[in-house]
Image: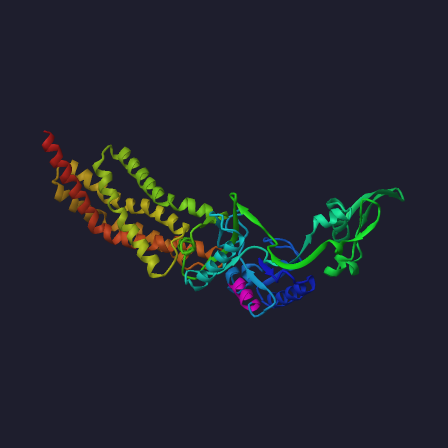
Amino acid sequence: MTSIQLPSEATAARTLNVVKAFEQAVLSRPATQSTIAILGFSFAGSGPNSAMAFTTLKGWDERNGATAFSEAAHAQEQMAMNPEAETFSLIPPAIDELGNSSGFTLRLQDRGGKGLAELKKAEAQLLALAAKSPVVRNVYVDGLPDGQMIRLNIDRQKAFALGVSFEEISQTLSGAIGSLYVNDFPNRDRMQQVIIQADARYRMQPDDVLALYVRNATGGMVQIGEFVQAQWETAPLQLVRYQGYPSIKITGNPAPGYSSGDALNEMERLVRQLPEGFALEWSGGSLQEQQSASEAPALMVLSMLVVFLVLAALYESWSVPISVMLVVPLGLLGAVLMVSMLDMQNDVFFKVGMITLIGLAAKNAILIVEFAKQIHEGGKGLVDATLAASRMRLRPVLMTSLAFTLGVVPLMLAIGASATTQKAIGTGVFGGMISGTLLAIFFVPLFYFSVMKVVEKLTRKRS
């Protein structure tokens, strides 16, 4: 999706020229199938200076490796050379109905009652800070820009002296400049409306407005310019409130190499540098991400607890599950190192892989611990049982782990649709399986021996 925003005074003709230039730049790409542009509409607001384009790409087999991100970046680069408009090419949101695009969305709020002018200064300061930050990019105000307006200052006392009521002034201006519905009339078996409005050439300039006449209380006609003065001023075309506070909607994206969580933390850091009285609130998908970010550690702990309870029920013991669960951090360590070495993001798909590793790492430990427990219960000493189980289960551990590790290699090397998702899951699981397998061979016997020795000591003390 591409948002095209011209200055507030721009006409529809200027907007159309920019849209044609955008269409020419996009349709020349071999990966583009079609694009449709809507003038006068955007997610930020409506007006002759706004436009919205929706570009459809060809199927994966016809793109030659082109992705939505690369095509959006190319469109952004091409339109950056057009000084007529601000153009932002965006990816649709990851979750439907949560925001209008990918990236982050926040509301800069005036919680201290500073006023619109100070809010605009804070907005400019925040955008300047974001432009210097290496963590975020394409940070912009998702709204209509301020524009020139004509303020009509009405001298009500003079109007009253001339016998002109404020209602008559308002009705005359509304009807002449805008339009005024009068009534309906039948025409060829159809009811049609009677709407009055001044002809275009009589409402183009401020002097045309002041030349209008309004009826006074005695039935005479008085020119509006007798008691009205016109002046130009810059004013907002859009006033937005969020949770009751005056606010400005700001949108952006994380820079390459940074996750969405890094971008959220960076924007919070930048907002803290603003004057007192201004704060941010997240909205859309960013709000959901912010609320769910604190749930990830709890989810990992809950997953480990479930595995522990299942093992406790299986072996009817607390000591054996503890020796099995001690190997889980070794697998998670390899996943983190693998992702860090490849400079990948710590996203939700990586967390899915981490939860998967909890069961996979525990599986390797179970293969050794279970046999060690059986041999020990058969009468052998703890050391001999542990060493015997390690030798017996070495080949099964390596075979099963190697088979699964090689099975996720296609995920690491994925291309095409959902390649990013597959790489995030596959890379973490691959690294975790390597470390979880190699380290488990040496540490699982040690963990089992140490835990069982502690259990034996506690048992003797109770006796």
Can I make out residue 216 in this image?
yes
| Quadrant housing the N terminus | bottom right
Q: Give the residue at the far right of this rendering.
A: 188
Query: x, y percentage for residue 14?
Result: 67, 65
User: For residue 449, which quarter of the picture?
Assistant: top left
Please state the extent of the stretch shown in magenta in the rendering. Answer: 70-79
The residue depicted at 70 percent of the width and 48 percent of the height is 156
Query: x, y percentage for residue 329?
Result: 27, 48
Can I make out residue 54 in this image?
no
| Quadrant housing the C terminus | top left
Q: Is residue 417 above or below residue 377?
A: below
Q: Give the residue at the far bottom of this rendering.
A: 81
Query: x, y percentage for residue 163?
Result: 78, 46
* Most frequent secondary structure within the magenta stretch: helix
- Tally the marks: 0
The residue depicted at 37 percent of the width and 45 percent of the height is 296
Nearer to us in this view, 268 or 459:
268
Nearer to us in this view, 115 or 400:
115
Residue 65 relative to residue 12: left or right: left
